[in-house]
Image (cartoon, grey):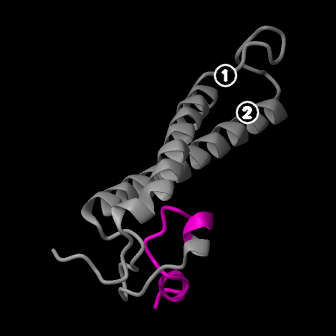
Amino acid sequence: MSKPKNAMTKREAKPFKQMLTVLRARLRGDVSGLADAALNKNPAAGSGSTLSNHMADMGSDQYEQDFSLSLMANEEEVLEQIDAALMRIESGTYGACDECGSKIPKMRLNAIPFTAYCVRCADQIQRGG
């Protein structure tokens, strides 16, 4: 596969690679922390018991567990996007839109370093078009 003309060189992409690596490490730590929080109930809650007899407490506990698992799933998706961005850096295609091939502005990459799309294409994809 040839390098898109709008892709960054590995030298240009180096700060983004560092940013992505730090973000990936942070998210991996957060994901394991969320998994622990969602799957292991806090024994300090209630009267030393991990199970509550009160229906409202049980609903609240279930909501917190569901919310933590939802965040974890979202973070897993972001981790996959980060890994894909790191692969694009290695292959020399980082910085070019996967959809149209145009250059992704550095301002956008600073905000969302794992994005594979320019604003226009990301908007069309989000709208389902």
Against 82, residue 7 (above or below) is below
Q: Say which residue appears at 15% left-offset and 74% top-offset.
A: 1
Tell me residue 104's x, y (percent).
48, 79
Against 33, residue 16 (above or below) is below
Q: Say which residue appears at 51% left-offset and 81% top-offset.
A: 122
SS at mark 2 in the image: helix
Query: In this image, 98 relative to 28: left or right?
Result: left
CB-based contact (under 8 Å), mark 2 and mark 1: yes
**Quarter-wise, where is residue 37 in the image?**
top right
Which numbered tag is attached to residue 41? 1
Tell me residue 22's x, y (percent).
53, 43
Outermost top residue: 48
Give amino acid for label 1: Lys
Q: Please give the range of residues in magenta.
A: 109-129
Q: Say which residue appears at 40% left-offset and 80% top-offset.
A: 97
Dot placed on the residue nearer the N-terminal end, 2 or 1: 1
**Quarter-wise, where is residue 109 in the image?**
bottom right
Q: Is residue 73 visible?
A: no
Against 93, residue 58 (above or below) is above
Spatial separation of the CA atoms under disc 2 and disc 1: 8 Å
- Badge 2 local density, few (<14 within 10 Å), some, or many (20+)? some
Q: Say which residue appears at 49% left-offset and 58% top-offset.
A: 16
Q: Across the whole image, how many numbered discs are drawn on residues?
A: 2
In the picture of the structure, the residue carrying the numbered disc 2 is 61
| In magenta segment, residue 75 | no
